[in-house]
Image: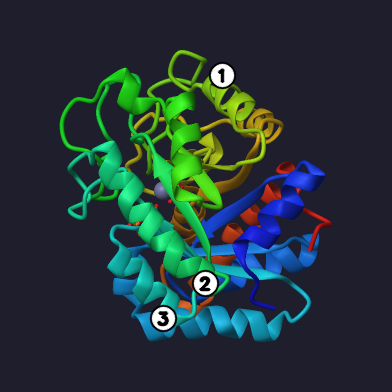
Amino acid sequence: ALVSMRQLLDHAAENGYGIPAFNVNNLEQVQAIMEAAAETDSPVIMQASAGARKYAGEGFLKHLIQAAVESYPHIPVVMHQDHGQSPKICQGAIDLGFSSVMMDGSLKEDGKTIADYEYNVEVTRTVVDAAHKLGVTVEGELGCLGSLETMEGDKEDGHGADGKLTIEQLLTDPEQAADFVRRTQLDALAIAIGTSHGAYKFTRKPTGDILSIKRIKEIHARLPNTHLVMHGSSSVPQELLAEIRQFGGNMKETYGVPVEEIQEAIKFGVRKINIDTDIRLAMTGAIRRFFAENPEKFDPREYLKPARAAAKQICVQRYQEFGTAGNA
Ligand code: G3H
Ligand code: 13P
Ligand code: ZN
């Protein structure tokens, strides 16, 4: 059944686990996530970015997710708008039937200009007022995703702050977070701790100076009852990079967020963990391998099947690693 995200996050908090939120753009990704959830008995958060709505078309995305809900009636599913850039976009998602929306007021509507704090409070509060009347969950964001190595906002997928950022912008301030939660009354808070979107997060395996789990602990100490959200949380497995390279792809040296660090974060209030890139890498590796090994094949079903299986495998792993398994 389609459920509100608040319900799932409350259960996760009571029972001390985290829930991966996977980005979806097409049929095979939706199927992979549902197969993984069914196999591990996990609740599902599927999220669609503005880019996903543009790529697939709103009607297609909505009905893909509804098909998932119908095909797996015993699994709770959240349909979440990822990175809504304005109250208008969030309202559009609510009208379309999403059970949860993210109002990302850390940036202005252009997705590049860093917003001032009062703007963020204002737009988030506006969305909360509209959404809560309908039982829809709201995620907000305070702080800017970006790299503590380069001090730049993330540019990987076309949104992210322009220019150099300060450490204060790249790490969410616990006191300000407390004020933000109190004034907006949101359900879940996305925080900045040094992660960024896409495959190129870190130039080395991250240590505390470039990935601040410590900051999560400080925020959780100040806001023990707030559900925290980690964006840019793909682990960028080295074996997937190797597979892509082995079959002709060009992936530069790069590192993601280690699963152990996410597991530590889950002990300190992180309940939703956003993952898109790992599924992209898994599908691309599988398709590259298939084409290399079967140059005579041309039926899309034949190469999308291993791609779907590879996506499913990543989802199964994350459901197990984050403690989601068994909680559907
Ligand atoms: O927010 C980041 C997700 O990875 C979605 O990326 O905007 O390319 O769909 P996208
Ligand atoms: P990744 O690029 O690390 O998968 O992050 C996805 C994300 O945060 C979507 O909002
Ligand atoms: Zn994100």
User: Closer to the camera: disc 1 or disc 2?
Assistant: 2
Residue 105 visible to the viewer: no
Task: Kindly indicate whether the residue at mark 2 contacts the one at mark 1 (C-beta within 8 angstroms).
Answer: no
Given the current orientation, which residue lies at the most extreme front position? 183
Residue 176 placement, left or right of 51: right
Give the amino acid type for the residue marked by disc 3 in the picture: Asp
Q: Identify residue for label 2.
A: 133
Q: Residue 133 in the image: x percent, y percent?
A: 52, 72
- For the point 49% across and 74% down, the residue is 98
Q: Residue 109 in the image: x percent, y percent?
A: 21, 55
Specify the label residue 214 is tagged with. Answer: 1
179, 38: nearer the viewer: 179
- For the point 72% across and 42% down, the residue is 321
User: Closer to the camera: disc 2 or disc 3?
Assistant: 2
- For the point 79% across and 54% down, the residue is 325
Q: Residue 81 in the image: x percent, y percent?
A: 44, 64
User: Closer to the camera: disc 3 or disc 1?
Assistant: 3
Q: Identify residue for label 3.
A: 95
50 w.r.t. 111: above or below = below
Give the amino acid type for the residue marked by disc 1 in the picture: Lys
**How dense is the environment of label 2, judged by Cα within 10 Å: few (below 14), some, or many (20 and up)?**
few
